Image (cartoon, rainbow, N blue to C red):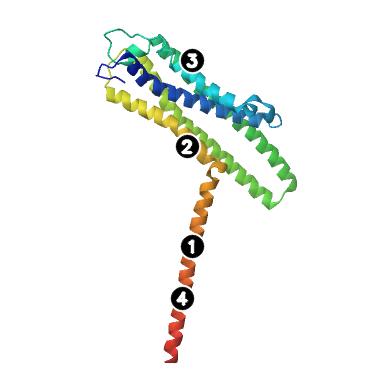
Amino acid sequence: MRFDKKFGYHVCMISYISPNFFFLSFLANLLMVHYEKYLCIIYPLRYHSIWVHRCVPLALVIAWTLPLFFACLPMMGWNNWKIDSNCSYKYVFTNAYIYMETYGVVIPSILAIAFITVKVLSVARKQLKDIKKLHRSVQSKAAIELEHQMDLRYARCIAIVSLTFLVCWVPYIAVLQVSVLAIAHYEFSWWIILTLTCVGSGSAAIIPIILGLCHREYTELWRNLFSRYCCKRRETLSNLHDMTSKEEKLQDGLTDVK
């Protein structure tokens, strides 16, 4: 980003720090959600005694305070600002800060999320094998059908996770690499940089929506409302159809009498 207007120090800092803070806080909350899910699956019996479950306000404070502190470091003095500087990212973020955020915060967090996801899927695969062993001891048709359903559900889960990582995180990592390695040495059109940044950040922002749509508890309300609306509409249409058929039969009967 670059602003042609010559903003003041605080206005320019806030214009760059705010988007960075929102993204870092989003990433921290997403990492906290994955970590909480990991603890729930790995330690199901001790989950209620773990600090993430017992101290939810503390976890939220950590997920928002640490990104705020890191994002405000340029405003605290870690910048290249001069008296005659225009509002450009080169004067707000130093190269050391960009390297630290990219390779010390963002990419490790993304890799941690990927590792937690793979670990959760491996535990789910192990549990699926145990369930299959129990079903094979029964040797019934219903048990075999249930095994096929579980296999399909697990395969769909792996496909969703893999596609989400490829679509949402890989573009953003590519944008970071381009931003860190290429922009300092080459001149790019600012429309290209802005487009790449929007694509990367927008793709990463899709992940909470995907997680919500894949969770049955989150979509249960909308499914119930949709089913009620569709059922009522079908009942209304069927009642109208029955009334129409009855009227036609009545008219046919009157015609026969005449």
Q: Going by the image, does 194 lie left or right of 230?
A: left
Kind of residue at badge 1: Arg
Q: Going by the image, does 79 lie left or right of 103?
A: left
The quadrant of the image that shows the C terminus is bottom left
Rounded to the nearest angstrom, the CA distance separating label 2 from label 1 is: 30 Å
* SS class, disc 1: helix
The label shown at residue 245 is 4
Please say if the residues under marks 1 and 4 sit with CB atoms less than 8 Å apart. Answer: no
Rounded to the nearest angstrom, the CA distance separating label 4 from label 2 is: 46 Å
Residue 145 visible at all: yes
Q: Mark 1 or mark 4, which has the lower sequence index?
A: 1
Q: Mark 2 or mark 1, which has the lower sequence index?
A: 2
Residue placed under numbered mark 1 in the picture? 234
Please say if the residues under marks 3 and 1 sit with CB atoms less than 8 Å apart. Answer: no
Kind of residue at badge 3: Gly
The label shown at residue 209 is 2
Pick out the residue farthest to the right: 137
Rounded to the nearest angstrom, the CA distance separating label 3 from label 1 is: 56 Å
